[in-house]
Amino acid sequence: MIPEIRVARRGLLHGAALLGTGLLVSGCSKNEGGSKAGGETAEEVGPGEDLMREHGVLKRVILIYRDILARLDARQDFPPDVLAGSAKLIRNFVEDYHEKLEEDYLFPRFKKANRLTDLVDVLATQHQKGRVLTDTILRLATPAMLKDAEQRRSLSDAMRQFIRMYEPHEAREDTVLFPEFHKIVSQHEYDALGDEFEKKENQLFGGDGFEKNVDAVAGLEKTLGIYDLAQFTPNV
């Protein structure tokens, strides 16, 4: 078996909380959900590429939200812990880490360079709106709240608004903001930011934060029964 490759922090394109749900365990070995085994070689990515792959975690949580929304609409049961764990992942990894990197290191540099300032303003506003929606989802993701029809409707509304905003939000960052970022900083500054991002990740997650959160979202998918990628293949 070929060992999986650890993806570290910067330079792939150079020259060319834990969640509190018991899903993250320090020192865990990698599995198909995105974990790593020993003896792997290091492959480095830059800060822009790093942020893009973190969007993959967000996309997978959105898929969880969509599945739960379908169950809410059909008045079907689902494990409340999966919804709470997904919202906590959004709070800890996306909002308190990923978005903070954008707000502290990217947005000010775009402002200083007078580039994409209107886009940056919208993105920053959407970050704040997303945190309000996550507060609502966390508050309503309990067995008691899910028994109340009105609260279930409020939960569905919050999740739909979250999805509707974040799908175009992350797409615009991936295709416009992040590619442009490499153009407004020097290569030295770009590489230094990669090191700074890794430092922040280690402070918050004790190392391998991306890998741990990929493992966490895979665990949530498995509990919900949507982990197997083959089930999404159309029969055509």
Image: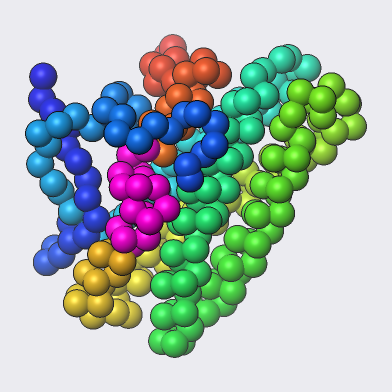
Residue 220 image position (x, y, % from top left): 51, 26
- Tell which of 233 and 139 is nearer to you: 139
Q: Is residue 37 visible?
A: yes
Residue 95 image position (x, y, % from top left): 54, 54
Q: Is residue 64 left or right of residue 214?
A: right
The residue at the far top in this view is 235
Up the image or down, 64 lies above or below 193; here it is above
Residue 181, image quadrant: bottom left
Residue 105, image quadrant: bottom left
Q: Which residue corresponds to the image point at 41% horizontal and 43% vertical from the top-left? A: 56
- Tell which of 154 and 30 is nearer to you: 30
Q: Is residue 225 magenta?
A: no
Q: How is the image coloured?
A: rainbow
- Which segment is the magenta one? 197-212
Q: Which residue corresponds to the image point at 13% horizontal and 28% vertical from the top-left? A: 3
Residue 202 image position (x, y, % from top left): 33, 53
Residue 129, image quadrant: bottom right
Up the image or down, 63 lies above or below 147; here it is below
